[in-house]
Structure formats: C-alpha cells, structure tokens
Amino acid sequence: GERHMSDKTVAILGATGVVGTQMLVSLEERGFPVGRLVPLASARSVEAGRVVRFRGEDVPVELARPEAFEGVDIVLGAASDELAGKLLPEAVKRGATCVDNSHAFRLDADVPLVVPEINAADIAGNNGIVSNPNCATIIGLVPLWPLHQAAGLTRLVVSTYQAASGAGMAGLRELERETRAVAADEPMGQTDPFAHQLAHNLIPQIGGFDEMGYTSEEMKMQNEGRKIMHLPDLRVNCTCVRVPVARSHSESITCEFTRPLSVDQARELLEAAPGVRVVDDPAAGVYPMPLDTSDQDLIWVGRLRRDLSAPEGASALTFWCCGDQIRKGAATNAVQIAEHLL
Ligand code: NAP
C-alpha cells in the first residue's frame, strides 16, 4: 500500500509465538499505521525460512539481535522475560519505544504498567519501555476499575482458571496432544511445559512458589494490580489454576469496597464501562464462558451477586468474568498502548 510520513517501522520480538501472531492480527484489525514490519524470532525460525502473514503478504522472519532494531520506531515485545531483558534495552538505545508483554520490567519504577481503560495517562512517563500487565491481572482489573471508581476498592479474593495457551504455543500444543492421548487411551509420557498432565485435570500452580506458599503468578495480581490502579494498600488474595481450556482465562472475584455498592448499581456501571460486556442472565443459562470469549476483545462479566460472607454493613460483591488472554490479556492491550505512542 501507500506509505505516509506518519507510518511507523514496527518490530515484533517473538513474532512467531502465540502473542506475536495475535499482534499481527491486532495491528491489522485496528489499522495501526505500520510502514514497515520487522518480525523477529529465534535462529530456528530464520533457518527454517519462516514467514509471517501481514496484510496479505508474507514477511520473512529476521533474527532477534540488537542490530535488528536499527531504524525501528516501536517494538512490541512478545518473548520471554530473559530475551526481553536482554534485547529491549538495545532497542531503546537505538531510539525505539517498546511495549513489552514479559514480566521483565513490569515493576520497575520508571516503567509504566498500563491497561489503557484504567491508566493510559501513565504512558507519558515512560523512558522507552511501557509494560503490558499479566494477562489474568488485565482481565480482572478491566471490570474492577469502574466499581473501584464508584465505591473505593479495598480487598480482592480471586481464583483464576487459566487456559493452556497462557503457557504459549507449547502449552496449546501439549493440551491438544494430551487430549488425543486420553481419547486413544495411550500412555501420557512427558507433559512439558506443564508439570503434570493437564487434560482431564487441574493444576493449582502457575510459576514458582514463594516462602509464603503463593506462586509468582498469584502475586502478580497483588503487585501489578496495586501499581496499575495506584492503590498501594490494596489487599489481594489470589489462587491461580491452570485448566484444560485452549484459550481465554476465567476468574471468580470477590471485591470489598469502602462505600456502599448495590448489585444493580454495579451492573449499571459495568454496562457503561469500556472494554466490558455484561452477560448475566443465569436463570436462562447465560453467563460468560471461555469458549464464548475466545478471539474477541471484551471482558465478559456475569454471575454478579452480593457477597454473602461479608460482615454486617460491609460493601462486597462477587462476580465471574472471562476474557481472551491472548487478545485483551496481551496483544490487543499492547497495540492499544502503542496507539497512545503515535
Ligand atoms: P510462545 O508462543 O512460546 O512464543 C515465544 C516467541 O519467542 C516465539 O516467537 C519464539 O520464536 C521467540 N523466541 C523464543 N526463543 C527465542 C530466542 N532465543 N531468540 C529469539 N526469539 C525467541 O510465547 P507466548 O505465549 O507468545 O509469550 C510471549 C510473552 O508474552 C511471554 O513473556 C509471556 O509470558 C507473555 N504473555 C503470554 C500470554 C499468553 O496468553 N500466551 C499472555 C500474556 C503475556 P521461535 O518460533 O523462533 O522459537
């Protein structure tokens, strides 16, 4: 197509992975002004002659290395913490601004951690890197934010039900393989990247455990949630579980507030909230489910009800939400942030 002065050279670090592949789609869908696309991946992909499909054209994958960022305006990071930690500072040195999906920089004081519906204003304070939050954190916070603004959030109790593709292409492929192995009554063998068989099972561990018995994934809900919402004292108790679902994370959330908030008020706020869709007619069997939220950008909220366990006079609600962790939990949120950099 025609090139414009405002068109950007955009690199994707990890362009062949689950998140990188979705970034290509999100850039295209949202009409991001890409003048030149630089898809970066490992030597494996380059040696195999891999291409990525972008706007109807095959673009050859290039090796992810510091020199690849020469002349790049915006880098979308979709690689491991280690690779992002090593390569993104090289991109910044060469004048690029990076939106990173890894955990590497998220809690750094000079790195904005952004969900555009909540704290887009923080992007202005970046020093070359803006971080995209953890996927489960984004999916929970999008509906929590309007409730917080109305009633003052003080405490969260969250259980997550996280899809296999949250562990990347390898996780998705492994669930597919295990599902076939179970159906064929074959021996399971190695279950990498999962520590246990996931098909017909649940794994209550995502990441490593700390000395208190919480996993790294669980502590992201607290630490990233506090940073994004500017609520340093927010109390969070989170349990993260890997479930045999291909795509879309689900969450059960109980939230406490300083001020009264009825179920009806909460429903009205959620119906008006950007990025949220209320799907809540339980008597008719209508509520969010991960199959239905896959491959779209909204966080679906339902099962909205009073918290029966809250002390007398306390303001607390319970709800269920689902969202596509590859889209709003990663690629789409990153492209939304990049739009603010234009
Ligand atoms: P993935 O599917 O495993 O993709 C990894 C990407 O990194 C691939 O493009 C891979 O290229 C590339 N890569 C791996 N080793 C490399 C190396 N040595 N040099 C250059 N490139 C290399 O992972 P993903 O799920 O997309 O996750 C990417 C990042 O996003 C991670 O930080 C993850 O935590 C985060 N994230 C993931 C999700 C999700 O739902 N999956 C959600 C939110 C955030 P090759 O094809 O050449 O190996």
Image (spheres, rainbow, N blue to C red):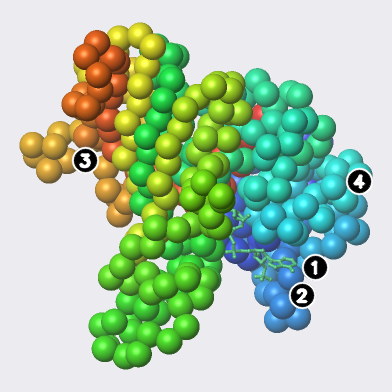
Res 66 seen here? yes
Q: Residues within 10 Å of mark 1 (few under 14, many from 20)?
A: many
Give the residue at the far left of this rendering.
Answer: 283
Q: Earlier in the sequence, mark 3 or mark 4?
A: 4
Q: Which residue is mark 2?
A: 43
The amino acid at mark 1 is Leu
**Residue at 29% of width from left, 82% of height from top?**
182
Q: Position of residue 89 (x, y in %)?
A: 85, 47
**Residue at 43% of width from left, 19% of height from top?**
153
Looking at the image, residue 139 sits to the left or right of residue 1; the answer is: left
Looking at the image, residue 216 sits to the left or right of residue 165; the answer is: right
Element marked by disc 4: loop
Element marked by disc 3: loop
Element marked by disc 1: strand
Q: What mark, if any, has residue 280 been given in the picture?
A: none
Q: Which residue is mark 1?
A: 63
Label 1 C-beta lies within 8 Å of the nearest ligand 1 atom: yes
Q: CA distance from mark 4 to mark 1?
A: 17 Å
Q: What mark, if any, has residue 287 been given in the picture?
A: 3
User: Which residue is at the front of the view, 185 or 155?
Assistant: 155
Place residue 97 in its image quadrant: top right
Q: Position of residue 172 (x, y in %)?
A: 45, 68
Q: CA distance from mark 4 to mark 2?
A: 22 Å
Q: Earlier in the sequence, mark 4 or mark 2?
A: 2
Q: Position of residue 315 (x, y in %)?
A: 29, 15
